[in-house]
Image (cartoon, rainbow, N blue to C red):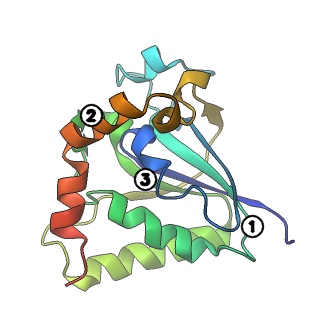
Amino acid sequence: MSELQKATFAGGCFWCMVTPFEELPGIHGIVSGYTGGHIKNPTYEQVKTGNTGHYEVVEITFDPSLFAYEKLLELYWPQTDPTDDGGQFQDRGTQYRTAIFYHNEEQQELALQSKAELAASGRFTQPIVTEILPAPVFYPAEEYHQDYHKKNPKHYKEDREQSGRDEFIDNNWQQS
């Protein structure tokens, strides 16, 4: 087993960003949390105001020899509307913006390359606004947010259906 790495992605509500990555070979854990803001140890109540500068993110621990960072990027992009700088789907505000937070130079290069490829693909007519940023301090979210889709499946399913995320994915990311 090679040394484990971290990948940190902001894609709107962190509840919806867990399921695409879980239970895949080489994924050792996914933690919902906050990063990028100006206060230490923020709470959900603070972050959801949009005034702390934090993003809602998932931090994925993975074994790059079993699941390459490029594969994580391939899974990340289709969970988002990379052209929306005001949030994601029904979740509006700076805390729901998209971003890829890199943990090393290789991740930075791969993320920039994947963003450029998406921009050149013609899939979207608007600019790709997802930022590629160095990973700052990560703060795990409160325990009730971890594995929310398993702890509260009915509410999670209803919230996801109402969000418009799946409709957007179906309309914009399905292979032609």
In this view, the residue in front, 48 or 129, is 48
Which residue occupies 61% across, 64% down?
Answer: 24
> The disc labelled 3 sits on which kind of residue?
Ala
Q: Which mark is residue 99?
A: 3
Q: CA distance from mark 3 to mark 2?
A: 25 Å
Which tag, 1 or 3, sits closer to the chain's start? Answer: 1
Q: CA distance from mark 1 to mark 2?
A: 33 Å
Which residue occupies 18% across, 46% down?
Answer: 164
Residue 31, horizontal then vertical, whole percent: 62, 41
Task: Kindly tell me whether residue 39 is visible in this rendering.
Answer: no
User: Please, what secondary structure does the residue beneath circle 3 have?
Assistant: strand
Q: CA distance from mark 1 to mark 3?
A: 21 Å
Q: Disc 1, disc 2: CB below 8 Å?
A: no
The residue that label 2 is drawn on is 158
- In the image, residue 170 above or below residue 15: below
Q: In the shown orientation, is residue 10 left or right of residue 176?
A: right
> The disc labelled 2 sits on which kind of residue?
Glu
Q: Disc 3, disc 2: CB below 8 Å?
A: no
Hey, which quadrant is residue 13 in on the image? Answer: top left
User: Label 2: few (<14), some or many (≥20) within 10 Å?
Assistant: few
Which tag, 3 or 2, sits closer to the chain's start? Answer: 3
> The disc labelled 1 sits on which kind of residue?
Asp
Hey, which quadrant is residue 166 in on the image? Answer: bottom left
- In the image, residue 42 above or below residue 65: above
User: Label 1: few (<14), some or many (≥20) within 10 Å?
Assistant: some
The residue that label 1 is drawn on is 63
Q: Mark 3 or mark 2: which is in front?
A: 2
**Which residue appears farthest toward the front when viewing the image?**
154
